[in-house]
């Protein structure tokens, strides 16, 4: 029900909160629009006047360098005025509620909020409470969703593999705590890949993860068989203190992506990672920097994809 | 006091196995007779109950009225009015007031608040441990003498099993009922939704049903060891039902209730991130719901409670995990019970028993029946009258209910508490 919150009455994007509930057609439209922003000759993105006069606030309640920077660049390439705020250390620590923070900024005539927050559902909550003229883009909420990351991952996969339908995709690591994994699973299934496989120890998988339309493996060597795309997830240090894993060392031995293990996947498999990477924890340096890695392409693609999403979400208010 | 005659109603009194058309005569706050009127009885007031059901007033085993301490959420005035409008004549008050009901002085304050609200039948449950911290025993004997009917640690954990054992032994020494919502605090830590497909999809911290069943199993063992009478409240899972059935079969003196919303809602009903659905224990699966319904029908679960937890708007305004759990539930208790009847989950008699006689038995109160000589706690309701949950006919200060805006059948027309008319529609 509430996931329709992100579409207007004509079924066009108004907010971008989660992949859930969005059609294959709409996801493809995002990818196509992103493609159109990239100069096919030199791969660079020039500036478009689509959001001239619009104000966008990046509201980051959690720290992030990469996501915030690419959102900023995307907004600038669309000619919008953009302001980035790190709230982790400002008003909310003085006891101001999330809603009051939003309402204060809204009073300054902001057209779009790009929000990152540590609690699942925070972006939904903000989208429900902003005025009708404001769009909200979820830049990651708790362990729930990171839909722009999922779209840039889809963009990267499409550029490398062209067609989604025959692909077998493995997502390896801390699925339980990963908003990237949840959004990627939904995007891959919506775009119709042949298989999404999650590979992790039981401690890092949500109960009933198979209900999300994935197959499950607890063994990396078995799990990588026939795989076209490997998405590695970052392992947070605090997982060790919460008794989810014994040590980084043991994790790397069991689930780290090494050159030897990479050979178990298809020879033309690509290696992805949402960053920041932990070298020697989930991925060996030689793989992260190797020929099959597209980790830096993901970062570059992030700008065009976020431009596409921002432009589409502003279209209904006459911004594009 | 007034002499009241309720006439021509369908009298349903499961305790006395009565289901028939007739009169109820009331004098001096007590029931004089049912079905037939004594020849010499001349009433001051006549209530025409044609096409209405007349039954004992409802006894709610678990509510929060938010006073003392949290009047911004709700007050005795607002919530007892809601209770009266819902046909509820006895309310058990959880001990997690502010301050906690762990001394006779607080118990007295609660009784004063109830009297001042014109609704004296608020029955306080005493804290099992001081400040509900789970470490040191409360003054259970003094609390019982002050009027507390049972002991409970509400939703707070007891430090360890030794402390729980000793508190059960001590409660048993004073013939006090222990009321427990079984929950292992480690397994449910920070959780806000059932550990299942919705938690997987929405990335929300989850609570496995094992958090309930493990605590339940431990408490059952200790009930056997200590001889303490135990009532398990707000049971939410099929696996708990199986454990309760087994324990009852073995002859253990235990009882159980289920919160009314658990008989109707599952994780599949949760509107994503809508805090109205944030409850503890969480809404579980369809299979759990069906097992709870079957347990109510078979008697493994004895009673239905409202688990009423009114909140102010701010408490429910936020991202789902950051909101406070609980439903404002007094006023939907009867209509939600009635919904189970056409579904053939339970009979109307069973549903009324689960709200009246069965909770009275658990509390060892001489209530919940229309027996001559009992105090006249009576609910008269129209089982067919339709109404909508909205601001015009809602009495509770808390509007936190997933049923807001929904239409129901079944509305109370009169509520009598000890022979006094406390609600007329």
Image (spheres, rainbow, N blue to C red):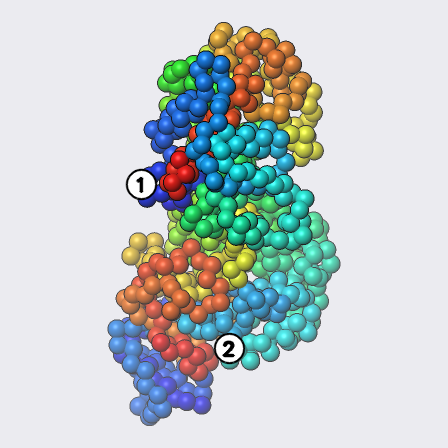
* Residue B133 in sight here: yes
Residue furthest out toward the right? B136
What residue is pinned by disc 1?
A10
The reply to whether label 2 and label 1 mark residues of one chain is no
Which quarter of the picture shows residue A271? top right
In the rendered view, does B406 fall on the left or right side of B224?
left
- Find numbered disc 2 in the image and state the secondary structure of the residue it sits on: loop
Image coordinates of residue B203 in percent, x first then y, are 52, 37
Which quarter of the picture shows residue B123? bottom right
User: Is B377 rendered above or below residue A266?
Assistant: below
What residue is pinned by disc 2?
B119
Q: Give me the residue at 66% from left, 46% from top.
A: A90
In the rendered view, does A103 fall on the left or right side of B415?
right
Image coordinates of residue B343 in percent, x first then y, are 30, 53
Image quadrant holding the C terminus of chain A, namely top left
| Nearest to the observer: residue B391 or residue B406 | B391
| Nearest to the observer: residue B40 or residue A232 | A232
- Within-10-Å neighbours for mark 2: few <14, some 14–19, many 20+: many
Q: Which mark is residue B32?
A: none
User: Is A216 rendered above or below residue B326?
Assistant: above
- Find numbered disc 1 in the image and state the secondary structure of the residue it sits on: loop
């Amino acid at each position: 029900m509430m996931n329709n919150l992100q579409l207007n009455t004509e079924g066009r994007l108004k907010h971008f909160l989660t992949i859930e509930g969005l059609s294959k057609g709409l996801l493809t439209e995002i990818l196509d629009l992103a493609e159109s922003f990239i100069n096919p000759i030199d791969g660079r993105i020039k500036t478009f006047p689509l959001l001239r006069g619009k104000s966008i606030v990046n509201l980051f309640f959690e720290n992030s360098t990469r996501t915030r920077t690419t959102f900023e660049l995307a907004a600038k390439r669309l000619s919008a005025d953009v302001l980035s705020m790190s709230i982790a250390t400002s008003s909310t620590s003085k006891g101001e509620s999330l809603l009051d923070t939003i309402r204060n900024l809204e009073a300054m005539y902001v057209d779009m909020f790009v929000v990152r927050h540590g609690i699942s559902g925070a972006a939904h909550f903000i989208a429900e409470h902003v005025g009708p003229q404001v769009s909200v883009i979820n830049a990651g909420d708790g362990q729930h969703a990171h839909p722009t990351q999922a779209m840039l991952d889809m963009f990267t996969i499409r550029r490398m593999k062209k067609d989604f339908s025959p692909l077998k995709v493995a997502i390896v690591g801390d699925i339980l705590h990963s908003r990237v994994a949840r959004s990627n699973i939904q995007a891959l299934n919506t775009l119709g890949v042949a298989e999404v496989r999650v590979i992790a120890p039981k401690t890092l998988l949500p109960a009933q993860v198979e209900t999300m339309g994935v197959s499950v493996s607890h063994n990396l060597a078995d799990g990588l068989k026939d795989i076209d795309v490997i998405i590695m997830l970052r392992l947070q240090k605090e997982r060790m203190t919460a008794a989810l894993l014994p040590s980084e060392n043991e994790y790397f031995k069991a689930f780290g992506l090494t050159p030897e293990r990479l050979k178990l996947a298809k020879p033309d498999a690509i290696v992805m990672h949402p960053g920041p990477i932990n070298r020697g924890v989930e991925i060996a340096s030689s793989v992260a920097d190797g020929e099959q890695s597209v980790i830096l392409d993901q970062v570059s693609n992030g700008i065009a994809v976020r431009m596409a999403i921002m432009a589409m979400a502003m279209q209904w208010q006459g911004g594009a | 006091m007034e002499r009241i005659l309720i006439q021509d109603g369908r009298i349903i009194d499961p305790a006395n196995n009565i289901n028939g058309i007739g009169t109820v005569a009331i004098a001096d706050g007590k029931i004089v007779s049912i079905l037939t009127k004594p020849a010499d009885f001349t009433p001051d007031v006549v209530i025409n109950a044609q096409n209405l059901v007349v039954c004992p007033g409802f006894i709610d085993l678990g509510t929060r009225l938010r006073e003392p301490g949290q009047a911004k959420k709700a007050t005795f005035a607002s919530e007892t009015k809601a209770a009266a409008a819902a046909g509820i004549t006895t309310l058990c008050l959880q001990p997690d007031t502010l301050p906690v009901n762990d001394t006779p002085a607080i118990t007295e304050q609660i009784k004063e608040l109830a009297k001042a609200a014109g609704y004296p039948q608020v029955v306080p449950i005493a804290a099992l441990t001081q400040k509900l911290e789970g470490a040191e025993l409360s003054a259970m004997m003094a609390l019982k003498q002050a009027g507390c009917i049972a002991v409970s640690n509400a939703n707070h954990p007891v430090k360890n099993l030794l402390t729980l054992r000793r508190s059960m032994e001590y409660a048993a020494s004073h013939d006090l009922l222990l009321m427990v919502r079984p929950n292992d605090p480690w397994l449910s830590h920070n959780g806000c939704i059932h550990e299942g497909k919705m938690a997987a999809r929405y990335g929300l911290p989850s609570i496995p049903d094992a958090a309930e069943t493990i605590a339940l199993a431990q408490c059952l063992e200790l009930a056997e060891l200590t001889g303490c009478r135990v009532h398990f409240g707000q049971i939410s899972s099929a696996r708990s039902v199986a454990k309760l059935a087994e324990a009852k079969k073995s002859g253990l003196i235990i009882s159980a209730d289920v919160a009314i919303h658990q008989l109707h809602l599952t994780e599949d009903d949760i509107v994503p991130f809508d805090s109205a659905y944030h409850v503890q224990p969480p809404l579980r699966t369809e299979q759990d719901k069906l097992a709870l319904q079957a347990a109510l029908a078979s008697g493994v679960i004895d009673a239905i409670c409202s688990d009423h937890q009114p909140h102010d708007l701010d408490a429910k305004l936020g991202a789902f995990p950051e909101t406070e759990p609980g439903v404002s539930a007094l006023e939907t208790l009867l209509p939600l019970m009635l919904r189970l009847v056409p579904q053939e989950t339970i009979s109307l008699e069973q549903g009324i028993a689960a709200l009246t006689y069965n909770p009275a038995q658990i509390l060892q109160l001489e209530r919940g029946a229309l027996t001559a000589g009992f105090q006249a706690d009576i609910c008269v309701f129209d089982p067919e009258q339709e109404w909508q949950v909205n601001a015009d006919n809602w009495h509770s200060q808390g509007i936190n209910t997933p049923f807001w805006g929904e239409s129901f059948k079944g509305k109370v027309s009169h509520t009598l508490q000890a022979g006094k008319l406390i609600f007329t529609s």
